Image (spheres, coloured by chain):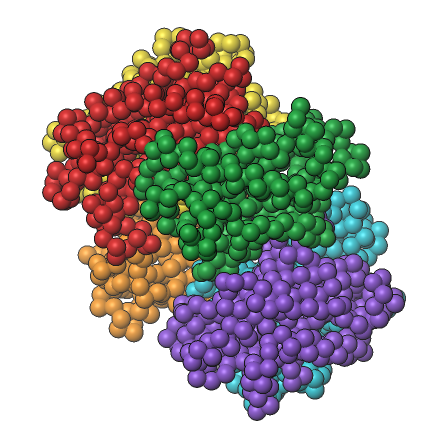
Chain colours: A purple, B green, C red, D cyan, E orange, F yellow
């Protein structure tokens, strides 16, 4: 049993509060154990320069942590004047993952800006961001659809993410908290669709390696955890959006 | 009567949620109408280079807004690679205001980092930040005192802030929301102590001016509003801290 | 009596040399005691992006100090690669103050760039900048008017600024030099118009506070000092511009 | 058969020229098809601040492309003043991968700086960098060992990397060139050790997804390609280093 | 005789490998002793903003060193976030020198981007860059001419550069390597045309000076060295380009 | 005769006002025609990191222009966040030139910071800066010597600079103003010592070249102009400093 009394393949308690803020077109507060992330989706009526004139849309993400989201205060990236490699990696991952389930042709020349701001961190902030950002994005796109700005429902399937890892005693665990993450030999982030397809598989041994059979075990643990996350997302987005997405996914 | 049905000299509803986050030494979520700011206070066991070796402490503040705290999404300052003049002005103001009620000698060679992150903005973010930051800072300093790290209680008095302004019809109003603020001819931010002393008086006519008698009216409106804020702070910080601060203030 | 033999409410000697440089449309060297600032006004035939298409003009200011304007050499902001919070605060203040007396509609889609470069500093550089910048700006706008580029005289009133403060012995003083400024408990910068209206009131207690009655005393001292500054400005700008501005101000 | 007449699971021609430059402690030019990367390893007799005093060493990597390594000229990152997210991701990956096969305790408080500069790009630059950087790093560490600066041979196993992907017709291919990479639905980079363990598995569907069985096929293709790369590395590093590494790997 | 057994006025061995890379319109690897520079020329079908609409082209250069081109590893300028004064000086020099022999009217509204990347440094990197960049630029312009994009052959004359200096014993030497350069009292870089005209003469005494007669001796040494460099360039560019340039130069 | 009625080899009127500012250890306003530069010298009691522990001093220079020193307003380098290549080239030149006449051993571990701020520009700002900076530096070093901080007089000789050029009609002219400079085919800056030795010779043909005999003519013109500058410097620095420097120079 783990320090927080979870079973190895048990997720932490999840909560997704929708319409968390008044201004954005979509916004949620996602809570995964002690990790809390505000995810917002903003609609901009143009696309970045490299996309112009193609009649297609774009989805992009930014990620940040409040300075005191963590045990020690971190210097703000705005104060340093530059974004760390870690932040860039995470925001590229979130954007790429979301684009895998969006029909960019269907949203027209619009950009969906997804912002994930971690207000409290206890491991798994990038996967919680993806899981929460999906819901915020669906809200924003659903409104565009409802107001007849889109002819076709643009969300192709559900999308959620979790982490799995191998702890020192060689045990495979699901949804690592910060303490577990910092002790893990292998850390893997998995993003999947509602249909059970992979979008991202990022496994890393920091000063360690992992075998083929361990990799299989990690993938299986992630698949089970992610199925559970889809349940929370289905409730959060409401019946109408759920039906539309499941309709698209079953084609 | 105002658009949100308030009287001219009526504050918006205030709420101060303490211990809002698990990691910081002090943290609050302050809500002033639709304005919401997370204020945290972090203790660092050293002072900036220009203060070293004097046996004194330092209090410094940083301020930021989430990109979608506002009606339109703002580009992150970390992405721009620099902090705007507005942000700098605000964080200098918050730090200076807090230092006015802290006995820097009493806190020893420590820095109190105060972070004010606006998650939702509807006018008055800088004054809400000061009012909330005071509470977060008291929590952090109170813990240092309780754990015997400080010989003397370091908070000299209460500190809160509000805005006042002159609307187009020449009406003096208290605690302006965003719509009012953008239409006001004169905008004034006032920071005061529990003893009724001024710490900051910043009055600005943007493409307008104000007379001596208008200034008097503005000051009076602010004084009344701020007295009410102290009530909220007193409740938020708890009986023990309140008694200590009032003891210091009455000397 | 003060260290430099002035009375508490006595200004330092003022000098405003006009047409100080050959290239700018307006330029002065303003001397206030040992503080010397070169103020220039440049006319650009366009406005910043956020102003375009409104038929209105804009006035903006930049402020800088030569590295050896002060007792110790300061690192250049160009070498640091960023502008300090103090500089940003000051240049925002100067621009805002000047705009209060300019009819932006009357200048058309033009930007007046005001540059204040401190070549020698002894306290009061921001208020000397405002007082000198007003004269340089009037010169530039006067030329536009004389050459028939403006239909209406765009300067609505005189504008000048000074500082007041409370020294340690609780004495209110006018026009603080550097030594006084660094010892003052309260420091206040006041910007006023020729009609006696306030444009900016910025009072700050650094690790100190001030009472309502002290505030009244400070305001009164500033008003008297600023009246004297208007005399110097009237001489500097010449009879024709003076008549035009006074005509506008009396409407 | 592929455009360049390769079988789906065939690598491009590989060449590793060692001691390519006179100054670095280790240097190679690795050629993989038309992709050419100069990899150097430099020994610095200290570690970064966060590692000091632990008696351990560090391995870190930097990656860059000449502006005209590609079909279109790219603006230099030094001219832009910042490093792109893609570059950061790649250099973090290279460093992490190399550290997985280095005994950091055995190298003492030293940093091995690995620089991978792509002089010609045709897909697979990050995996070619890892494969080449391993050889340059072994050269540098081997010299430290030969000159008795290290008590223990610090390289624990071989390390190489390649890419695999799924092309539009659902075909799994090995070692994608630029044209294939830009058309692939799924792109996966795999880093493995001589013992057949995984160090990194990074699979990404850009606007696409992949199934569990496709993932298995990709992993298998990568394993075969990487075995061949080890043969080139063994020849490049020479008999003595090869024996030492294989001795460590068999423990 | 010098440390590397050269006579005082003897150049190091020169080699110019053309078509060194597959992507650029022109590319060479120039080797001068142990100094090796990759020079590429890229054609862009537009000019910088300050040149637009004049019907003329532009030639600009960038220069960089790999971090381990030198005996000690240098921090990358992209990592520092800014370009050093030395780099700026060199790239301005290369661009200016090349423009002296190009008929900018003849190339139309195009920019020739010349990139000089030093992969190994042993003194004389800026002069080797100019000598090699000339050849890469001729290749790119020659292709434009051959494909009928230019009506007139745009290269007016040959262009090459070398360094001369005064060593401690007052001896004038040609083509200094790194060791000589770091001990020289006077260092001079000379750029000349095939017709024997000067384009740049940059002589510098670092903590030293030089007389009129020494200056004459330095100029003479450079002239002789540069004549030899033209021989290498003539071979490298091929018969057809050579004839065209010599035709232009003899007008 | 030239547009400003000068003979081809005639300097513009020169004026050197010493002790121009109250704070710096040395300061002058140098006027060369319409070019005006404030040069200051500041003494810092330490050297940069790369010089520490050698018992030697350092002289370094910074150069800047006020935004409206020129006919068109220039964006400040602090606002751009970086220093231009032109500025870097000039400040490196000024520092290098001054170091050629200073005995760095004699000044001990001190840095002399020389700041040249152009308040009005009409060509020749870099050479006026060198000529003026020499005087400011002598003042600062003279004070160190007078207060017995230096055992040996550290200035080895006089140092001054001017520009020469070739105008379109092939005429060699001395001390070019801005109009002449922008039309010149060849522009050369020469720095010389009181003994008639060269410190810097920087001749550049922008889209032009120059012959050996033209070079000789340019050098001769510069020599004559510089002799006259030494007369102004001798008067400016005073009898005592002059005697000391001439004593050193005649050794």
Residue C61: quadrant of the picture: top left
Closer-to-camera residue (F59/C32): C32
- The image position of residue C71, as x and y in percent, is 47, 21
- The image position of residue B93, as x and y in percent, is 52, 38
Residue A126: quadrant of the picture: bottom right
- State the residue at coordinates (52%, 41%): B225
- State the residue at coordinates (49%, 54%): B122
Q: Quadrant of the C terminus of chain D?
A: bottom right
Q: In which quarter of the image is the N terminus of chain D?
A: bottom right
Q: How many marks?
A: 0
Closer-to-camera residue (D89/E76): D89
- The image position of residue F27, as x and y in percent, is 39, 20
Closer-to-camera residue (F250/E115): E115
- The image position of residue B163, as x and y in percent, is 47, 42
Drawn side of residue A148 relative to residue D232, left or right: left
Instruction: Look at the picture and state if F106 lies above or below B27.
Output: above
Instruction: Look at the picture and state if B8 lies above or below B56.
Output: below
Drawn side of residue B174 relative to residue A115, left or right: left
- State the residue at coordinates (35%, 28%): C161
- State the residue at coordinates (36%, 55%): E60
Q: Is residue F198 visible?
A: no
Residue A124: quadrant of the picture: bottom right
């Amino acid at each position: 049993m783990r320090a927080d009394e979870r079973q190895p393949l048990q997720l932490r308690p999840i909560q997704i509060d929708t319409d968390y803020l008044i201004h954005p077109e979509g916004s949620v507060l996602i809570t995964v154990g002690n990790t809390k992330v505000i995810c917002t989706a903003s609609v901009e009526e143009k696309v970045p320069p490299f996309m112009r004139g193609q009649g297609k849309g774009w989805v992009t993400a930014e990620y940040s942590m409040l300075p005191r989201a963590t045990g020690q205060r971190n210097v703000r990236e705005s104060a340093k004047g530059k974004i760390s490699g870690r932040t860039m990696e995470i925001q590229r991952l979130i954007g790429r993952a979301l684009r895998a389930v969006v029909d960019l042709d269907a949203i027209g020349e619009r950009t969906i800006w997804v912002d994930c701001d971690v207000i409290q961190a206890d491991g798994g902030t990038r996967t919680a961001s993806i899981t929460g950002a999906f819901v915020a994005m669906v809200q924003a796109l659903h409104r565009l659809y409802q107001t007849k700005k889109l002819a076709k429902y643009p969300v192709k399937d559900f999308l959620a993410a979790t982490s799995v890892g191998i702890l020192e005693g060689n045990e495979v665990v699901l949804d690592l908290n910060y303490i577990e993450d910092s002790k893990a030999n292998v850390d893997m982030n998995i993003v999947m669709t509602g249909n059970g397809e992979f979008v991202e598989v990022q496994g890393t041994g920091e000063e360690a390696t992992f075998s083929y059979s361990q990799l299989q075990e990690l993938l299986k643990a992630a698949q089970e955890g992610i199925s559970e996350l889809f349940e929370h997302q289905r409730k959060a987005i409401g019946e109408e959006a759920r039906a539309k997405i499941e309709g698209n996914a079953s084609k």
